[in-house]
Amino acid sequence: KIDCAESYFLESDSCENVLDATSDDPSGFPRLAGCRFMSHEARLILSTRLKPNSRYDVTLKMLNPPGRYSASENNFHLTTEYYQLKVIEGTKSPVDMTYIIPNTKSWAELTPAEYLFDYN
């Protein structure tokens, strides 16, 4: 589960917002059994467990909020859960994502910008 403080996801019950998923494990990234994207939260349901001491990379489609935010304000929490009943592992503190600077010549036309976010 990924919980974002400021950035948000396009709401969806499919895995269309997962752009890439890789692993250094010879068997590859576990098959995605399902996905759920809700405003500031993303849930990826895997068909098998993650293996210890393996690296997993996921690239997701997200939106930045309008306005200016520092990296510490635009952060996320990452947890590994067992059927949403028990947290197996998670970040001890929020992970800084990236700072947001409006990228437009007209402040009146400022809308959220789509960007890619890669976490390891």
Image (cartoon, rainbow, N blue to C red):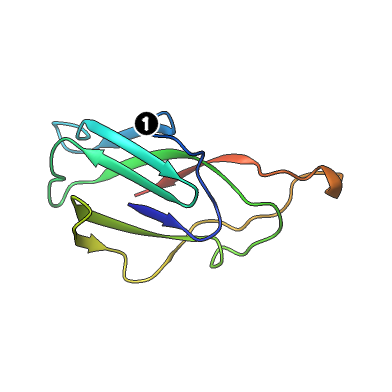
Q: Quadrant for residue 43, please give it.
A: top left
Q: Looking at this view, is 37 or 58 the one in front?
A: 37
Q: Residues within 10 Å of mark 1 (few under 14, many from 20)?
A: some
Disc 1 element: loop
Residue 53 image position (x, y, % from top left): 15, 52
Residue 51 image position (x, y, % from top left): 12, 46
Q: State the residue position of label 1.
A: 15
User: In the rendered view, would you say 116 is above or below 5?
Assistant: above
Q: Looking at this view, is 51 or 43 the one in front?
A: 43
- x 49%, y 61%: residue: 75
- x 55%, y 52%: residue: 7
Q: With 107 as the anchor, is 88 left or right in this view? A: left
Q: How many marks?
A: 1
Q: With 111 as the anchor, is 106 left or right in this view? A: right
Residue 33 image position (x, y, % from top left): 23, 32
Residue 70 image position (x, y, % from top left): 61, 65
Q: Looking at this view, is 88 or 116 the one in front?
A: 88
User: In the rendered view, would you say 8 is above or below 14?
Assistant: below
Q: Say what amino acid the circle numbered 1 marks.
A: Cys
Query: Of all residues shown, which one is farthest toward the bottom?
Result: 93
- x 69%, y 52%: residue: 66
- x 56%, y 58%: residue: 6
Q: With 94 as the anchor, is 113 left or right in this view? A: right
